[in-house]
Image (spheres, helix red, strand yellow):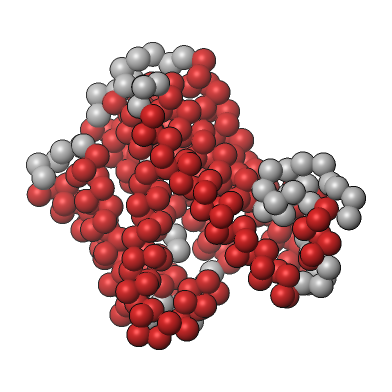
Amino acid sequence: MSERARGFVWVTLAYVVAGAAAGAVVWARGGDSGLWTAFLADVAGTLAIFVFSRIFDNTSFYDAYWSVAPIALAGWWVWALPGDPTRGALVFALVTLWGLRLTLNWATGWPGLHHEDWRYVDFRRFGNWYWPISLAGLHMFPTVQVFLGMLPVWLAARSTAPLGWLDGVAAVVTLAAVVIEGLSDLQLRAFVARGDGGICEEGLWRWSRHPNYFGEILFWVGLALFGLATEPAAWWGWTGAVAIIAMFVGVSVPLLDNRSLKRRPGYAEHMKRVSAIVPWFRRSA
């Protein structure tokens, strides 16, 4: 068995254990389908993944968790809550499509357990503080953020109101987000595979420096629209989408742009010409 295959075996085992830990929480709380139980189950699953990260000294065990956990959450809520079955099936299908595509994209490029994401490696400069930082910032923080993003799914799964026009808008936005993310990932992978180096300016990347982030933001906005369609007064259903937008705009984009400025000649001029996130007309340098 290759090193990469062994890595997938261990990651799969970690996710099975995480699922069992989450299920144990739900069982201990009598099968309750409320938000608090779901959150505790999500935290239990995250802690299980953290144990594997610590044992193998590799935080990348968490990489796919945030795209897998929403599928489990959506499935549980749609099954357990007495909402409109058509809306429930629609939301679950969209979340599953998003999660499977993102997980497959991760698996396609993941070289194995000898590799750790460069952002995690950067944090290792904190020495003995690395693992507390990993637990709080690299495991728990994204878990909380994604859970907030899933709140509209809970709202949609419990609503008995029939499908309306806003559900249709939400479905179109969410599906478009998955397509945009998929296209941008394929275009970038094709560019990297050619080994030309330089800066990718093909397809969606010609109009946005981070079209994959645009798709990700659009996905969570689409879910928030499902919440708006079912419970317009539940403003807190937007907290996840707002938090995710803030993360991409305030952290992820500056972090990647600064890295590219150091590694890619001409990137400063590229930043002047091309929109950061939202695809838009190119500017004169």
Vertical order, 132 against 158 (above or below): below
Q: Horizontal placement of 125 versus 25: left or right?
A: right
Instruction: Name the residue nearer the viewer: 96 or 58.
Output: 58
Q: Position of residue 12 (x, y in %)?
A: 36, 65
Q: Nearer the viewer, residue 137 or 58?
A: 137
Q: Horizontal and vertical percent for residue 69?
A: 36, 51
Q: Is residue 178 left or right of residue 58?
A: right
Report the number of numbered marks: 0
Who's the residue at 26% across and 56% down the image? Answer: 43
Q: Please, is residue 232 above or below residue 183 in the view?
A: above
Q: Position of residue 68 (x, y in %)?
A: 40, 52
| Name of the residue lying farthest toward the bottom | 127
Q: In the image, what residue occupies the spot 34% across and 60% down? A: 140
**On-image quarter of the N terminus:** bottom left
**Visible residue check, residue 89:** no
Give me the residue at 35% from left, 52% from top.
Answer: 144
Q: Residue 193 falls in which quadrant of the image?
A: bottom right
Image position, residue 37 (x, y; %): 19, 44
Residue 236 shows up from this direction: yes
Residue drawn at x 32%, y 74% as measured from the top left: 132
Give the position of the C terminus as an image quadrant: bottom right
